[in-house]
Image (tube, rainbow, N blue to C red):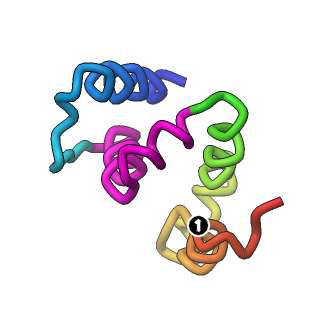
Amino acid sequence: MIGCYHLGIVKAFMAEGVLPKIISGSSMGSVWAAFTCVRTDEEVKRDLKAEILPEKLKRLDVDWPERMRRLAKEGAFFRHEEWLEQVSGNNMK
C-alpha cells in the first residue's frame, strides 16, 4: 500500500521536531493528514506502532467493488454512519 509511505515522513518529521501543525493532502495523503492532525504528538507516536496501526487501518477496509456499488446506489464510497461509529470507538475490539 503506497499510501503508507506517508507514515515514514510523519515519523521522520516528528523525530526531528519539525512536524507542521497544518497538513493537507489528497487521496491517501488526506487520510494521513487527518490521522495526524486530530491527535496530540503523544497520540500519534502511540498510534503509529505496529501493534496499534492495523486496527486503525480497518476503517478503510472496504474493497473497490463494494465501494463502486455504494457509489452507484448511495452516492458515496463510504457510509458516514459506519465511519463515525468506528472512529468513536463504539466498534473497536
Residue 54 percent location from the top left of the image: 69, 38
Q: Is residue 33 magenta?
A: yes
Q: Quadrant of the N terminus?
A: top right
Q: Is residue 45 magenta?
A: yes
Q: Quadrant of the C terminus?
A: bottom right
Label tally: 1
* Magenta span of residues: 26-48
Q: Residues within 10 Å of mark 1 (few under 14, many from 20)?
A: few
Where residue 51 sits, quadrant-wise, is top right
Residue 22 percent location from the top left of the image: 16, 50
Residue 25 percent location from the top left of the image: 24, 43
Query: Which residue is at a point 53% across and 62% down the rendered structure image?
Result: 77
Task: State the residue in front, 75 or 7.
Answer: 7
Q: Looking at the picture, does residue 91 appear above or below residue 53?
A: below
Q: Which residue is mark 1?
A: 87
Q: Main secondary structure of the magenta part?
A: helix
Query: Which residue is at a point 76% across and 63% down the rendered structure image?
Result: 92
Residue 68 percent location from the top left of the image: 58, 56
SS of the residue at dot 1? helix
Q: Looking at the picture, does residue 58 appear above or below residue 17?
A: below
The amino acid type found where label 1 is placed reads Val
Task: State the residue in front, 21 or 4.
Answer: 21
